[in-house]
Image: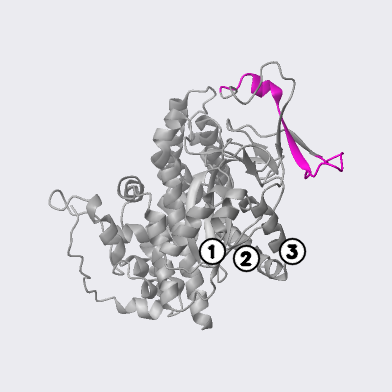
Amino acid sequence: MLNGNEQAVLSDFEGLYDRIIPSKHMLRQFNELVDFSFVYKELHDKYCLDNGRNAESPVRLFKYLILKAMYEMSDGDLVERSKFDMSFKYFLGYRPEDDVISKSLLSKFRKLRLVDEELMDKLLTKTVGIALGLGIIKSKSIIVDSVHTVSRFHNRKAQEVLQEQAKKLRVAIYRVDESIKGKFPAKVTNDNLDEHIAYCEKLLDVVAAEEKMAIFESVTTAAGYLREMLDDNLEHLRTSADGGAKVGHKSADTSFFGYKTHLAMTEEGIITAASVTSGEKMDGKELAGLVEKSRAAGVEVDAVIGDGAYSEKENIEYAKDNFELVSRLSSTVTKGYHREGDGFEYNKDAGMYVCPAGHMAAAKTKRHNRDPRRKENPRSVYYFDIKKCKRCPKREGCYKEGAKTKTYSVSITSDIQKEHQKFQDTERFKEMASHRYKIEAKNGELKNRHGYSTAYSTGLQAMRIQGAAALFVANLKRIVRLRAQY
């Protein structure tokens, strides 16, 4: 049951916070910037209001997720630190002498209370509103790009993932005290998932029984991640598949198994919109949604800056009389030679086209017009693996039986694309395009400081929750820094 009357309880030790936590501490500034009561209003309908015992404050649980995004810790380590870190206790709304939650509540909160596909949009709108209110956002252009997040399970068997994390825990223990090795359960040598799970549970029991291990951060961190892996992803471990993750490409030769978060950001570094997709989705298809979400959040958008992935014909048409699209045109991105809506999509990271079945071209070449009397533009020709085409379930209408090759050609042909070519030769285009690097720094910040390089759970919904918390934190930190400059 959700208690609607959350009132602060006075403490004789409240003055400790004023003495210990500096006025410029990031968490103190977060509390001053944001009225977190909006979380209670958003999650009100997710709780029973008249039955059962009182639930833990949703505001507090949401703040735990913010701390997780800020400090990249497992649930267990996060809750443990909140017991003694006064800045954490202050931010979470505890009195200095209060006990803290059980770590299992965080997993339940993510799974049961945050089932909302619009959560990310709502949190970003909240931070954008704060930035607008402080006069921080002055530009009228947004920069767009995507950031990759690798699946926690890397398209491997669940047994392999558990073995790897259990090994990390054993190594951490060996560095402290090798004598404990004799207390470990016998390693599992077969491929039975239940036995691997049971082994990990026994290994964690051994660590818990050794009280001296609690003082070594390397051991508690490794144990925390193994415990969280079992608690948060047991259902996934038994099905052994991350259904939301897909294979995407960073280049023609490198790929990843995971997700993409498509971002829109102002030139001041405030993220205005985002969407999470599986890894194989193309960046250009998300442009319209990012622009509309940014405008819905209150941002004026007169120009959009992006790389060549956003210069496909549909986006140029969408931008016409709507905003300036600062995206360099490429004959490999535009579609003029083949019919529209044929399902072939350009992957700008790999520099190759992907067919409707998800197979990437194996090679490409450029063909020039050999007859000067024919006014034809050069064409880029992409070659697909004919062996895959022969057995592809979508080959009808795409692959001709008996053909020895399967190619796909693109060229620049439309007037609107030629008009865009003229724009990209102007000094204005070049000056605006020079600002695109800013979003690369934001991507690096998300990966290196907010744990966004790897998904901490499985499925699109879990990735959206992780993204919502990480982007919310990134925006608040940026607002704090910019506010100090004005």
Mark 2 Cα shell of 10 Å, populated few (<14), some (14-19), many (≥20) = some
Provide the residue span drawn in magenta: 367-393
Is label 1 in contact with label 2 (beta carbons under 8 Å)? yes
Name the amino acid, label 1. Met
Tell me the SS state at disc 2.
helix
Report the side of 387 relative to 81 (left or right). right
* Label 3, label 1: how far apart the Cα atoms are: 24 Å
Percent from the top left, x then y, of residue 397?
60, 24
Name the amino acid, label 3. Asp
> Quarter of the image holding residue 280?
top right
Is label 2 in contact with label 3 (beta carbons under 8 Å)? no
Q: Nearer the viewer, mark 3 or mark 1?
A: 3
Q: Is residue 99 above or below residue 280?
A: below
Visible residue check, residue 153: yes
Write down the residue under mark 2.
438
Q: Is residue 28 above or below residue 379?
A: below
Write down the residue under mark 3.
425
Mark 3 Cα shell of 10 Å, populated few (<14), some (14-19), many (≥20) = few
Extreme residue toward the top, this view: 402
> Quarter of the image holding residue 430?
bottom right
Percent from the top left, x then y, of residue 105?
31, 50
The numbered mark at residue 265 is 1
Q: Nearer the viewer, mark 2 or mark 3?
A: 3
Q: Residue at x 46, y 79 (%)?
A: 135
Extreme residue toward the bottom, this view: 486
Comparing 370 with 61, the one in front is 370
Q: Is residue 367 above or below residue 39?
A: above
Percent from the top left, x then y, of residue 203?
46, 37
Comparing 5 with 213, the one in front is 5
